[in-house]
Amino acid sequence: MTTTTANDMGAPAAADEAPGFRQGNHQGAVRACDTTGLPVCLTAQLFIKLNAVLAVVFLLVGGVAALLVALTRWPSVHLLSAEWYYRTLTLHGLNMLIFWIIFMEIGILYFVGTTLLNSRLGSKALAWVSLVLMLAGALIVNATVLIGKADVLMTSYVPIQAHWAFYLGVILFAVGALVGVINFFVTLYIARRDRTYVGSVPLVVFGATAAAIIATVTLLHGAVVMIPTFTWAVGWTDQPDAAWYRLVWWGLGHQSQQINVCAMVSVWYLMGTLTTGSKPLNQAVCRGAFVLYILFINLASAHHLLVDPGVSAGWKIWNTSYAMYLAVAASMIHGFTVPASVEVAMRRKGFNKGLFGWLFAAPWGNPGFSAFFFSLVIFGFLGGITGVTLGTQQINIIAHNTLRIPGHFHTTVVGGTSLAFMGLAYYVVPLVFQKEYPAKALARIQPFIFAAGITIMAVAMSLAGSAGVPRRHWDIEFTGAQFSAGFDASAHLMMGFVGIGGTVAFTGLLIFLLLTVWAVFLGRSNAGKPMEQWAANAATVIQREHLTDHDEHKTPGTMVLVLLLLASFAVYYFANWKALADAWHVR
Amino acid sequence: MSHQIPADDWFKAPSGGERLWIGLALAWCLILTLMMPYWHFKGKQNSTGEAYRVAPADFAERVNRFVAANTVGEDKGVAVVAPPPGTDVYLQAQMWRWYPVLKLKRNQTYRVHISSLDLNHGFSLQPLNMNFQVIPGYDHVLTLTPTSSGDFSIICNEFCGIGHHLMAGKIIVED
């Protein structure tokens, strides 16, 4: 509302209607951040810390499993036995895609709901319930997998059956996550009720809310599919239909990746601000794009059923395109607005040389920035382009269940979400844990190592998959099979690169884990003073934002980048149609 | 700043480069959308999802009848079956084999019925890299026209237990 607008009392808007923070509702349990001055609810801080620590523990479990899986698929190493390969792969999927990411996301929800809205956490009791259920669920699942009672892979497609404890663990974890999400909604409500702020919620809170809404729908799908599977495993009910299971399970499985997308994009906006002082060019556009996620992303279950029996072509086309690719449009919009806002911030600081002077001058020595920007580029150029192409109904015929699929999602979930969350950690540890990272030089190169490793691995997976190499497969030589099968030398070479890239990525992950654990438990406290800047580079100083007057509509560098994206997209997309046209005729 | 409460006038129409990009993105999404129905009319490779419910035992019986009627030989102890072009063909997936070996003619069309007797399996034809899902309880019908000849392998690309990597079958296409 502007100063000339009357408020609903008929009087001119008073100063207390101006957007911003008001009296908090913390009742003393609050501290002012020594770096940003933002209010930190101490209850929320406790649970942010607990969730973050558990997230990192499960990241370690999933990471060790990742290395073992990569070393098994590297043909000349072929480390694990078949039994332990599938077991480790099950462990890897669940710990990475579910436990690490969702623990982290609940922590993020608690942070943005409290600090950015000047509020206390909704309920301490709910936070404990959530934490205990999630932890119990994760431990039960991991224990069941490790003792060999759940060699069913993450998807556990019925009629393959795990011990009932496995499904129970998944249900407990999902309920715990749902309780955490509800606690976030309660926090939003009490902040509004107690008028801790006036105006619209910040963009990052808006994005996190979108993630929370998608999470609710996702977790309800989880309940619908996992409860009858659990009762079947116990022996109380009949087996759920195998095709029905796939449809509803992917309502959980794919949509949980959309929570990640939504949370990751929110983190991009936050990291852009924290590392370069960027601000959204047009809040309506950014928020509108989040609304598109909420409205259309829930159709994505279809991506896994494109060559399934029993679902019609019309159903497949409508749902795989999220109505009309409106969620893809949303990602393309964020893919512009995020770098464009960084470009404007940098140009205003005087880094105005040529098309990309702003990008070269960006704070690459700040791992928060490099992790965020690599995440953006890997997600857009590799994850987005491959995802839309593989999810095209007919093109899926030459992609379904090949290594192209994990090649795709390791660039969205790992190179995208996980890397963005690592960048966030480089700020969470100093600001929330109030501990400084040791060996900052090592931290500065960590995102480069991780991004390089995951890119090599994912591209190699994609190429091997294009040659037909299946995902989730122990021996592509088919030693001992009734009929000979196998792949040519180039596919084997690519599998070597999968192993090498995976090892490099694991090295990057290990550096992150060691530094973070060291910082949290043994790091130097920075309580009472601002966090040490990651980069002395002038680019990171937020206060210098208005040094020069740059027109915020002029973002030529970003325009060139997105046009390059569109061109790469078109080439890859139509090259796949061309490849499909060479296949046998089928309908 | 993205983490702060915005000024009240945040609701604005996009402008400049942002507006141009939104237009381009929506236009591209429209092309992506139209390609799929277009290919159903003009393209030769489509997954229609044609399927019928079938009990695994019934499907096994149909496979056995099909094999008994059309067997022309044996390969590594497995029946090689050469059905007349244009007829119904049956392919059975189970842990961990594809049955039987099919002998087809190039440029002839067959209705290939695929189902599983136990778990989910993945029909993956190599080196063409054509992939379809096989689900127990569902007779998945592919109306298939081989357009190249030679020996092709069928591998399983849906995890189906410890012997998953042993599951390989064969299709022979003759000119």
Image (spheres, coloured by chain):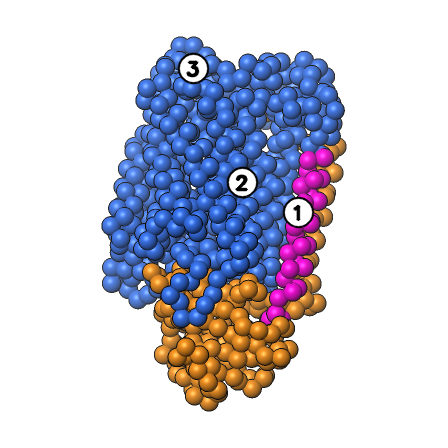
Chain colours: A blue, B orange
Answer with the quarter of the image where residue A474 lies.
bottom left
| Residue extent of the magenta highlight | A560-587
Which residue lies at the image location 57% right of the left edge and 49% below the top edge? A387
Is residue A318 in sight in this rendering? Answer: no
Residue A239 versus residue A410 in the image, above or below = below
Residue A425 vertical position relative to residue A485 in the rendered view, above or below: above
Query: Which residue matches tag 3?
Result: A32
Give the SS element for disc 2. helix
Taking B37 as reference, is A132 left or right?
Answer: left
Disc 2/disc 3 C-alpha distance (Å): 40 Å
Q: Is residue A186 magenta?
A: no
Q: Is residue A582 magenta?
A: yes
* Residue A143 to residue A344: above or below: below
Question: Which mark is in front, 1 or 3?
Answer: 1
Where residue A61 sits: x, y (%)?
34, 39
Q: Which mark is residue A569?
A: 1
Q: Amino acid at mark 1?
A: Phe
x then y, percent, for residue A322: 58, 52
Query: What secondary structure predominates along the stretch shown in magenta?
Result: helix
Within 10 angstroms of label 3, few (less than 14), some, or many (20 or more) residues? few
Q: Amino acid at mark 2?
A: Thr
Of A14 and A328, which appears nearest the observer?
A328
Mark 3 or mark 1, which is nearer the start of the sequence? 3
Q: CA distance from mark 1 to mark 2?
A: 17 Å
Chain holding disc 3? A
Q: Are marks 1 and 3 on the same chain?
A: yes
SS at mark 1? helix
Q: Which residue is mark 2?
A: A455
Considering depth in this image, is A14 or B129 the residue closer to the camera? B129
At a point 54% along the width and 72% down the height, the residue shown is B151
For discs 1 and 2, the disc positioned in front in the rendered view: 2
Residue A3 visible? The answer is yes
